[in-house]
Amino acid sequence: MAMNGVLRPGHAALRVLDLKESMHFYGNVLGLQETGRDKQGRVYYKAWDERDHNSLVIRQADRAGIDFFAFKVDSPKTLEKLDSDLRAYGVPTERIPEGEMLETGPRVRFQIPSGHLIELYAQKTDVGNGMPYVNPEAWTPAAEKGIAPTRMDHCLLYGPDIEKVQKLFEEVLGFYLVEHIVLEDGRTDLAIWLSSSIKAHDIAFVRHPEPGKLHHVSFLLDSWEKVLRAADLMSMNRVSIDIGPTRHGVTRGTTIYAFDPSGNRFETFCGGYQTYPDCQPIKWTMDEVGAGVFYHERKLNERFLAVVT
Ligand SMILES: [Fe+2]
């Protein structure tokens, strides 16, 4: 089954060590728009071209990492169906009432075998992208503030039992496998890239003994030139760059990995091919894994595998 009503990644909820420092980073350096603060002290952001109220939520905590990652579904009816499908599959779900997150409808939360909390929701207030729905211009000044990605695009999560994660995403949520890296035994996946759309990935997982870890949340840029501009802005603002600008072999995206002030890795990227559920998955073998991850360098760096939050 594929494309059964899960539209796209909707929001990522991150923990940060110092809220003020993080607000400067996400608001001014990455260039997201702050859209609200709630009673819990969480701060909400969206990328300039996103129309829904929020796609990134941060809260202060004593350790960095990800609280949950959510997908928007196409209707309340689909939300109900997927909730009951998850329970029928043996996955307990929790209902989080409308309004627990600002401008966001009821959410269905569940834990996946890798230890991460995933949410589904159908409603979030359309606050627009600063341009009218009738006769809009091409962009707004917000498109030039900071790195200014157009949207929060996907995440890569580290945890155990990724074959069970893949099965759940495929059989219940309608995702399909786009690419994978296979270990030396020729059978076990080290990493999987899954799509619910025609994007090369909406979520990805790497096998890792510790559950619930974040490798990166990714933000989309329009062009390779904007990826280079992002690297300049990272240097100007003394952002710690992990690697890049470079290209991935997997998905073919052009990319920079860097760290927010709390050590959460983020990606600013452009491109990647379009795919469909009938496309045969692309396989990478361990002898070429370096080129799969970093196409120009053709080798992994130690940080890529070891540093997660
Ligand atoms: Fe990525």
Image (cartoon, helix red, strand yellow):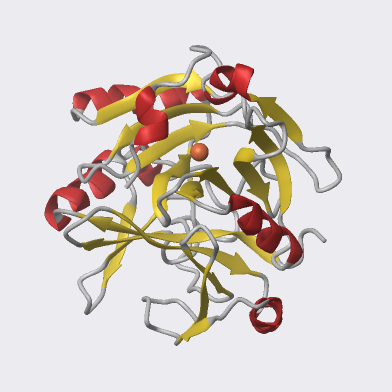
Q: Position of residue 151 (x, y in %)?
A: 48, 48
The quarter of the image holding the N terminus is bottom right
Q: Residue at x 69, y 33 (%)?
A: 273
Q: Residue at x 25, y 42 (%)?
A: 263
Q: For residue 253, which quarter of the picture? A: top right
| Vertical position of residue 184 compared to residue 196: above or below | above
Direction from residue 100 to residue 200 in the image, left or right:
right
Seen as rendered, the residue at the extreme front is 185
Q: Position of residue 146 (x, y in %)?
A: 30, 37
Seen as rendered, the residue at the extreme top is 297
Q: For residue 35, which quarter of the picture? A: bottom left
Q: Is 116 in front, or is 56?
A: 116
Direction from residue 125 to residue 307 in the image, left or right:
left
Q: Position of residue 58 (x, y in %)?
A: 28, 60
Q: Position of residue 292 (x, y in %)?
A: 60, 23
Seen as rendered, the residue at the extreme right is 278
Q: Residue at x 22, y 76 (%)?
A: 40
| Vertical position of residue 265 compared to residue 22: above or below | above
How many numbered markers are drawn? Answer: 0
Q: Is 198 in front, or is 281?
A: 281
| Vertical position of residue 264 compared to residue 164: above or below | above
Q: Is 36 in front, or is 172?
A: 172
Direction from residue 49 to residue 75 in the image, left or right:
right
